[in-house]
Image: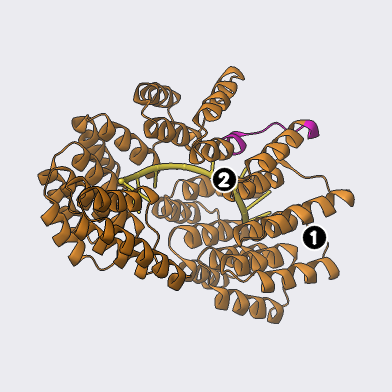
Amino acid sequence: MGRRLSTRLFNVCIASLCKAHKLEKAESVIIDGIRLGVLPDVVTYNILIDAYCRFIGFDAGYSILHRMREAGLTPDIISYNSLLAGATRNCQIDQSLDLFDEMIQRGIPPDVWSYNTLMHCFFKLGKPDVANKVFKDIILGEHSPSTATFNIMMNGLCKNGYTYNALMLFRNLQRHGFEPGLVTYNILVTGLCKIGRLGSARRILKEIGESGHIPNAITYTTVLKCFFRKKKFLEGLELLSEMKSKGYTYDGFAYCTVIGALVKIGKVKEAAEYMMDMMKTGIELDMVTYNTLINMYCKTGEFEEAYKLLDEIEKKGLECDRYTHTIMIDGLCKAGNIEGAAQHLKYMNMLGFDSNLVALNCFVDGLCKVGQTDDAMKVYKSMEVRDSFTYSSLVQNLCRERRYHSAAKLLLSCLRSGMKILKSAQRAVLLGLRHSGFPGEAKKLKSKIRIARILSH
DNA sequence: TTAGGGTTAG
């Protein structure tokens, strides 16, 4: 009894170290434990499999299985399901299928979790048809489906562009007595918001209330994000105050949504208030949170604060990502510090972030804004990949300098490459040509635009 | 052990 209890406590300790990403420490605790006579059991190894899969990779997780056998222990269904989850996280379907073979061979029959994970893997690979076959197999097979089976199915359908099918499945299940949990509702709300069906999303939100569930951070941030994306700022702010009046506690995700949205609509003062709130709660800042804050400081021109955060990130052992660099480059450009932006771009390339389209687009726009349009054109010509942002920005800036013929040329090459361009950029070129004494050119351009559009469809 | 929300540009 004493021995079992200490192994359990030992596993709790290993699990919390693994959760905190401290794998080396967890390993050294295991060694200490062995010295003290507490031997790792199947649960210990299962915790390690999951952590190694999550933080290092599938192969590292799989190697724990060997260690387990060497220690004289037999992997169980949880060991295999953790490995399946690891393979699914990286969309390694071959490894998943090999694991199924291995499980059957070793006399550990896959359970409903194994099939759920397999179905999830096919959805992640963008193969909803195969995923659907797995789903049918679960329904008709010997295992009864779990709530997660339906959740993974509905989530997979939404992510693969079949949100309405997910909604139909949901209604069908409800008719058969299925009682959705908050996760199910959130999956549907997310799916509907992603395709812009705010009305339907709101109906689901109402149903959540009627079902007796209480919407959580995820529900709110999802709907909030959708309001802001659809430029329904007023409704977004109303929802925000509703959340506030309900005494709703935010987490890091919710704070990022709110701060990001407020910065976007220029309400930086309010954004800063939310930032202070967030700091008070003592939330552990991750890269996304840092990026959100750096973006806020860049937009208010407080670069010193932004650089302080960059130092803090480094001290914490975190690594800036492409968002961080893009935010810095855009911020410096917007503040007119094109030199600083160019330097940061070089620094970013030095770090190995070599094909950052968004950062280059910001730089091109920044160069135009300080009147260095020819330099912007040079950068544009050197770019391996361009998108609708690149062209829209250049065309608009060329028009501002009354260089309508160059703008027209770029406009056409954009449309001829099958990309869209901002309507306002198109209008600027056509109006510019017309009003600067080239109405004939404008007319010709209009026809060319029409043909380019037809050909690109 | 599985599933859901957050950060960048015209």
Nearer to us in this view, A240 or A99? A240
- The residue singled out by tag 1 in the image is A145
Residue A329 seen:
yes
Q: Secondary structure at mark 2?
A: helix
Task: Give the x, y percent position of residue A72.
Answer: 59, 70
Q: Which chain is painted in orange?
A: A
The amino acid marked with disc number 1 is Pro
Q: Secondary structure at mark 1?
A: loop
Q: Which residues are magenta?
A: A210-220
Q: Position of residue A359 (x, y in %)?
A: 26, 52
Q: Amino acid at mark 2?
A: Val
Residue at (19% x, 40% y) in the render: A332
Residue wearing tag 2? A12
Chain in yellow in the render = B
Q: Give the residue drawn at x 70%, y 31%.
A: A214
Within the image, what quadrant is residue A73 found in? bottom right
